[in-house]
Amino acid sequence: MDGAQSAGYATACIGKWGLGEANSPGIPNKQGFDFFYGYLNQSRAHRFYPEYVWRNQEKEFYPDNQKNREVYIHDKFTEEGLAWIKEQSQTEESFFLYLPYTLSHVDLDVPEDSMKPYYDIIKEKGPYINPKYPRGYRNHPTPRACFAGMTSRLDRDVGKILDLVDELNIAKYTVVLFSSDNGPTPAGGADPNFFDGNGIYKGIKRDLYEGGIRAPLIARWPGTIKAGSQSDHISAHWDMMDTFAELAGTKAPKEHTGISFVPTLKGQDAQGAHEYLYWEFYERGGKQAIRKGDWKAVRLDRHKSPNTPWEIYNLAKDPGESNNLGNQNSELQKEFNRIARQARTDNEFFRWKK
């Protein structure tokens, strides 16, 4: 967020960070954020009653949390976020808050008051038992009620943020964007099938089918975005930097690959679009995916079979990716091979095994 700082914005990150451990150049305070409160380590972020989190570059300890579970850290993220917004509203400085909440995510863990409403209306399949605990995810007697409670608590606290923006009379000048980084997961006792977490889409987290990588983006900007309006503009997280830069009146870094979707937010016609979107994933055999218009290509087991044919789907006719047209489209096979060669940049940390 160096660009936001140089444009005169106060900046804060509150929640989960995973791009650099303590004393590394990747910590939020060295990546453009004036204030940071939260986790630096993604594994620690699975625990909702942590021994400590970071306040800027110092540990803030909760010594009784391991035994007495006194401080549910999600609530502290909300508390810190509300306090920071109030503080900024007292100045004439513009501000940017990145609030990467850890709900709803494993561990399945939430205070009783959030689960209680669901005990009588959600049928449980049984407890979640991890035989290796305390290694890995914690056990839970009512995993479905817990997941529902975590989601409700997230909804409640996002509401608190929006209410505060309204109370401070800054809603007209404040853009709020809410999204997720991936599809649902069955890890730790979560049950995406029960909650229909991916809807009509195939796949879950760590898949490159639409159920793993497609997520909605909800935008709020009173007076600019019409309430209840929708857009079918296809975008990706790497468009966020360009979007934020345009909103802040500055320029994105030279090495950017995104396209600002500010025109879509404003309901304008001059929205740029990607020729294609490209993903790759190095776990579980290695996977690639490409989206070009209505066409979607997926390649599995990439480490062992780098030249295996693409699965090809027409998302306009088949959003659930159930009808593989790969054998019928030799020209599209060539086109997706071309894009795959063009799109990726070799990296010493992210390489195919072949």
Image (cartoon, grey):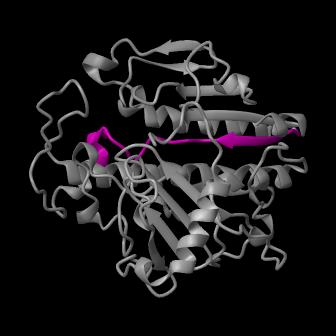
Residue 277 lies, in percent from the top left, at 62, 63
For residue 117, which quarter of the picture?
Answer: bottom left
Where residue 352 sits in the image (x, y, percent)?
Answer: 48, 42
Q: Position of residue 213 (x, y in %)?
A: 48, 59
Horizontal side of residue 344 vs 354, given as left or right = right
Q: Residue at x 78, y 60 (%)?
A: 260
Of residue 186 and residue 316, the one placed in the foreground of this image is 316
Which residue is more in the foreground, 222 or 341? Answer: 341
Up-down relation of residue 136 to residue 61 (above or below): below
Q: Quadrant of residue 36?
A: top right
Q: Is residue 6 above or below residue 255?
A: above
Relative vertical location of residue 54 with respect to residue 129 in this rendering, above or below: above
Q: Nearer the viewer, residue 324 or 21?
A: 324
- Residue 127 in view (yes/no): yes
Residue 224 seen:
no
Q: Which residues are magenta?
A: 92-114
Type of secondary structure dominating the magenta stretch: loop
x and y, in percent, of residue 97 in the image: 68, 41
Within the magenta stretch, is there residue 132?
no
* Above or below: residue 7 compared with residue 319: above
Name the residue furthest bottom.
Answer: 317
Is 303 on the left or on the right of 136, as rendered?
right
Report the quarter where the N terminus lies: top right
Nearest to the observer: residue 338 or residue 288: 338
Residue pictured at 39% horizontal, 51% vertical? 206
